[in-house]
Image: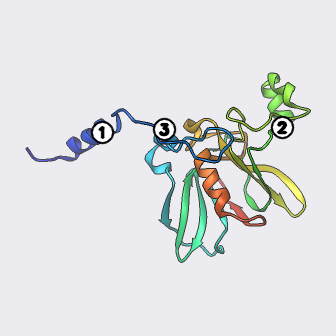
Amino acid sequence: MPITRRRLLAALAATAALPWTPARALEDEPFPVSTSDERKIQYKYRRREVEYETAEPTGTIIVDPRKRFLYFVQGNGKAIRYGASVGKAGRTWSGAATIGRMEKWPTWTPTPEHIAEYPKLVKWQDGGMPGGPDNPMGARALYLYQGEVDTIYRIHGTHDPQLVGKKKTAGCFALLNSDIIDLYNRVELGARVVVMAY
């Protein structure tokens, strides 16, 4: 029986539906970070090295909110590409910034806009929510600055892998926790970040 495109796609779908045994958690983390979270997102949003031509220097982060990708420029026409969750409609920002701060398992303090939308968050207004598996900032955060001014935008992890590839954040850029750890280990404080216009 000849293999048609339709049969091939059906076979691939059946394979994707097979039970999955979770991979081990990342070691040396104070909270669980599963390396199998990538199985919960579309294949195209999984981390990989790609061909990527840019005039930006090696070590730059480029965010393409329209396609929901974040690139870490490696030079020689290559980049590491990560799937990202980006801002909801009306909550987008574009421009250039630098990484002014880097934190592991950061504290999250809701903004007045967050509290207006979700009043129950007021309990975290003063001291902030400590880092942990339920914290919306995830395992790492890269804080974007313009000069000495905090833009209030972040590149951070997410406790919900199903957000990756969607317009779901309050304006920041969220990656899988395993991906933000990978990016955090590659990038340097002061690195350039370019967020493309939506």
Mark 3: which secondary structure? helix
The answer to which image quadrant residue 123 occupies is: top right
Farthest top residue in view: 120
Place of residue 37 in the rendered image (x, y in percent of width and height, measured from the top left): 52, 41
Task: Using the image, tell me which numbered label, if any, was put on residue 187.
Answer: none
Q: Which residue is farthest left?
A: 1
Instruction: Quickly name the residue at label 1.
Output: 15
Which residue does the numbered mark 3 point to in the structure image?
Answer: 40
Q: Position of residue 26 (x, y in %)?
A: 57, 46
Q: CA distance from mark 2 to mark 1?
A: 42 Å
Relative height, residue 193 to residue 66 (above, below): below
Q: Is residue 196 visible?
A: no
Residue located at (87% from left, 34% from top): 112
* Residue type for callout 3: Lys
Location of residue 113 in the rendering, given as x and y in whole percent from the top left corner: 83, 34
For the residue labelled by badge 2, is the local secondary structure a helix, a strand or a loop? loop
Give the amino acid type for the residue marked by disc 1 in the picture.
Thr
Q: Quadrant of residue 100?
A: bottom right
Q: CA distance from mark 3 to mark 1?
A: 14 Å
* Mark 1, secondary structure of its residue: helix
The answer to which of marks 2 and 1 sits earlier in the sequence is: 1
Residue located 48% across and 64% down the image: 50
Give the class, few, some or many, for how many residues have Cα within 10 Å of label 2's Cα (few <14, many ≥20).
Answer: many
Q: Using the image, tell me which numbered label, if any, was put on residue 109.
A: 2
The answer for how far apart the CA atoms under marks 2 and 3 are is 27 Å
